[in-house]
Amino acid sequence: MNEQEIAFIEANIINFEAVALGFTKNIEREVLEEYATLYRKYINKDFNFNSWCGSCVFDMLKRLSAHYEGIKYIAKLNQTKPNDVETKNLRRRK
């Protein structure tokens, strides 16, 4: 996902949080269309979006949420880790 898509998801993260709790709220049509575009791009290119089908919207958001969480997890793994290993001086000074 590019930065604009991630920014869109983070700006509308409340929808993913609602799905995690088991419901969806009234989501604007433009936001739903953007979610459908992301869904077609990353999950299923043949997806037919029906905003009137509540379970379809819920399922789409649930799958997009899982995809987004996976991307965040991979990004976290790819970050450079600081050297947390403490070294011990093996040479004794006299």
Image: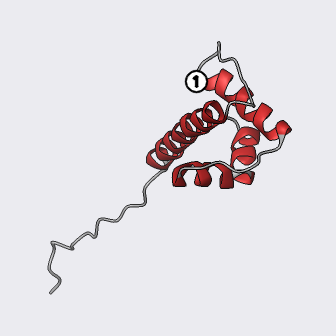
Look at the picture and state if 39 lies above or below 20: above
Quadrant in which the C terminus is drawn = bottom left
Position of residue 31 measured from the top left corner of the image (x, y, whole percent): 80, 40
Nearer the observer, 16 or 27: 27
Look at the picture and state if 52 lies above or below 66: above
Q: Residue at x 77, y 45 (%)?
A: 27
The colour style of the image is secondary structure
Q: Residue at x 17, y 83 (%)?
A: 93
Q: Which residue is mark 1?
A: 43
Look at the picture and state if 65 lies above or below 44: below
Nearer the observer, 62 or 6: 62
* Quadrant of the rendered image containing residue 82: bottom left
Q: Residues within 10 Å of mark 1 (few under 14, many from 20)?
A: some
Look at the picture and state if 50 lies above or below 6: above
Quadrant in which the N terminus is drawn = top right
Q: How many marks?
A: 1
